[in-house]
Amino acid sequence: MALLTLTDVSVTIGKLQPLDKISFHIDKGEILGVVGESGSGKSLTAMAVMGLLHLIGGKVSTGTVQFAELDLTKLTEDQYRRLRGRRIALISQNPMTSLDPVLTVGEQIDQVSLLHLGLSAADARARSIDMMVQLRIPEASVVHSQYPHQLSGGMKQRIVIAMALVADPDLIVADEPTTALDVTIQAQVIQIMVEMVRKLNVALMLITHDMGVVAQACDRVVVLYAGRLAESNSVHQIFATPKHPYTRSLIGCIPTDKLTDGELKGIPGNVPGVMNYPSGCRFHPRCPMAQERCSTEVPMLKAAGSLSVACHFSESAAS
């Protein structure tokens, strides 16, 4: 049974609609990758789930965001505050700005247990240190008393992950969690995070532009482009038989061992801004398969089993 279900979710900011009828689900204990280039709508989707759209003047204008027994679009801010951190936790992009510089990292992890679990100060400290140990933080009791500026970027991100996990949530939303980290430690942090959510049977919505991370970590994949759902499927099927030309293009950008001349592949053009969305299929100006109908007709989302795809020529795209 699905833990989180988005059904035809559209987001408006003023008169603009940067997210258009997005639908997908996440099961308990599942890792779902949400992928696409910058401007595809990944972070807006995360904000819709976390109830943070009001911070940028946005709102869910149509559709539902169902989390277990709750329709999140109907919650008040006070109700959302009780939910965030306890049942739905966020791991943000930049650990350098996520942590309070005037509090020790241990105090910041402790506060989650104090607020959401009602533990005593001693029990909260013990729970925090135990979580830090599980996240392979060396000398956890010492690090507990240190300030963010005393830690490396990778260690800070483990602290942020500890804050997300310590209250035993049902769902974690991780928005590009390794973007700010050195490339040499990105894979390590992803591996540790994935191991922990698997161990604790927590659902993870992993937002990334990196298809290599998706292949490493995810069970299923949702591909967004210019505010619309392009394709979703199991991670195996996405890589074995991608149906949407955009998905194929993203996979084609993954570096391989066969790169002998040092040339990396890219997708010509850019994701259009919300004020310049083209008519028809929004990918058609960049699509190598585009035909006349692509510029005028919006492709319907077709579903079959685990696959959902929005392309007029999805069968041809797989050949």
Image (spheres, rainbow, N blue to C red):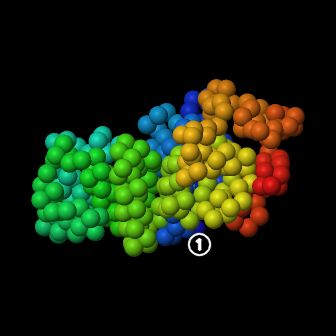
Tell me what residue is drawn at x 23 percent, y 61 percent.
137
Image coordinates for residue 154, horizontal then vertical, percent: 30, 51
* Residue carrying label 1: 1
Q: Residue furthest right?
A: 292
Q: Residue furthest front?
A: 260
Q: Quadrant of residue 19?
A: top right
Quadrant occupied by the N terminus: bottom right
Q: Residue furthest top?
A: 275
Q: Amino acid at mark 1?
A: Met
Secondary element under disc 1, as helix, strand or loop, is: loop
Give left or right: position of 178 versus 244: left
Quadrant occupied by the C terminus: bottom right
Image coordinates for residue 262, horizontal then vertical, percent: 54, 40
Q: Quadrant of residue 16?
A: top right
Relative to 106, is 293 above or below?
above
Give left or right: position of 281 versus 7: right
Q: Is residue 119 visible?
A: no
Relative to 174, is 70 above or below?
below
Could you say which is closer to the camera, residue 252 or residue 92? 252
Image coordinates for residue 227, horizontal then vertical, percent: 63, 40
Q: Quadrant of residue 142?
A: bottom left
Tell me what residue is drawn at x 67 percent, y 26 percent.
276
Give left or right: position of 229 versus 279: left
Q: Is residue 190 visible?
A: yes
Tell me what residue is drawn at x 57 percent, y 29 percent.
14
Give left or right: position of 153 versus 150: right
Tell me what residue is drawn at x 63 percent, y 65 percent.
236
Relative to 113, is 23 above or below?
above
